[in-house]
Amino acid sequence: MGNEGRRVVVTGIGIVSSVGIGRDAFWESIINGKSGISEVTSIDTSGYRCHRGGEVKNFKPEDYISRRKIRFLGRSSQLAIAAGSQALTDAKLINKETVQRDMGVVVGTTTGEQPLEQLLSAWAKGGLKNIDRNKVFQAAANNISENVGMEFKTCGQNYLIPTACAAGNYAIGCGYDLIKSGDLNFALVGGADAFSTVAFTGFQRIYAMSPDVVRPFDKNRKGMMLGEGAGMLLLETYKSAVKRGVHIYAEILGYGLSCDAFHATVPNSRGISRAMEKALLETGLTYKDVDYICAHGTGTVSNDKTECQAIKDVFQERSKEILVSSIKSMMGHPMGASSVIEAAACCLAVQNQIVPPTINFENPDPECDIDCVANKARKTKIRIILNNGFAFGGNNACVVVKKIE
């Protein structure tokens, strides 16, 4: 487990998000504080209080997938394959048959595929005769990871992880374990979720959504804003990356998980603290080693307050000096894709030594008295980043990202 040859590194990044499609467009947007929030057009929001979200614009699946295949894929699968294609191309592994047998796929999601929603709607309107049998095969959530695996002809393990809004970090952790143990040499890991009426309705119904902008950690924050997208990372061993002569973005040092099942919808600071503490314990670090926390930072009153309390509990006297920011202020909350897109931001942050900002921050909250890198990116020395991902059901996952020395 601990030998030098099994160090796990990131050599490929793929992103489809509301702030940009592709690594460079995404990074350019978030370091410049560009918002991807707009009026939602892919679903009918006329009956809702909120009409805005982090919708992906100008996405053309035919840029990544043959037209013949597209009609058989749900939008979440399309987004995941597009991000996967970017990551594999970036890592110089696209269409490399010699490594396909040693590559696995792990994808996280919250809502799965849209065809399930479409099937239920069709059933309600016309019963069995109204069901499109092609959509039956598209509806299962595990189709997302299967479709990614089939597209790239991978022969290793193939997992779908449905741990809601922390699923991306869970996927990274699973891929990390598979490589660390020697079960795989390459893992394509990530998360994908497309806009759906079910998700939009659910977050509206619990009054969690902001009607205008996302203001993480701001005293006048009004809630989160739903997003969509996909993020994929190519993980491999350090030894393999050096041998292949490819660029290494960062090292994944480890992760920590905690579950507070008794706090299904109300966040619990102790559960969040435990996830951060476990991540540090597994990696042999202390709270003094972390330079930046990429926050879950949804912009809801309770989530931000609870996350800040957990940071205070874990980081003690450093809680006001350590840098903490939320890129959800720009891209919205793309559910199962969020923490892996944020992990990609962490890899780019350690590479470029820049911390992306929390935008829309105007009024400090005494209960969130942290340095949230307000409104403007900050150039600084970064070696260790803690990437936070939390979810309903108390599924908490934190991943530690390290600069390659």
Image (spheres, grey):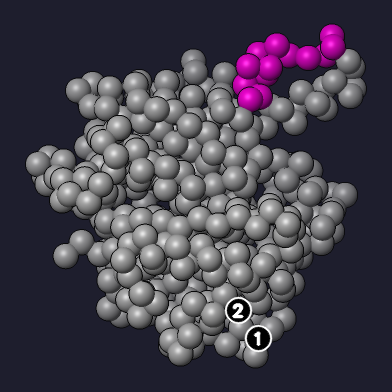
Judging depth in this view, the residue of 26 and 259 nearest the camera is 259
Circle 2 Cα neighbour tier, 10 Å, few/some/many (<14 / 14–19 / ≥20): many
Q: Quadrant of residue 304?
A: bottom right
* Residue shown at 71% from the left, 27% from the top: 116
Q: Position of residue 59 (x, y in %)?
A: 51, 40
Residue nearer the viewer, 285 or 371: 285
Q: Residue, x 73% and y 57% (percent of image)?
A: 262
Q: Earlier in the sequence, mark 2 or mark 1?
A: 2
Q: Is residue 33 magenta?
A: no
Q: Pointer 1: what residue?
A: 367
The magenta segment is 128-140
Tell me: residue 65, above or below residue 294.
above
Instruction: Give residue 390's position: percent from left, percent from top.
Output: 58, 58
Q: Is residue 95 visible?
A: no
Give residue 309's mark.
Answer: 2
Question: Looking at the picture, which amino acid does disc 2 mark?
Answer: Gln
Q: Are marks 2 and 1 in contact (CB under 8 Å)?
A: yes
Q: Is residue 316 above or below residue 186?
A: below
User: Majority secondary structure of the magenta segment?
Assistant: helix
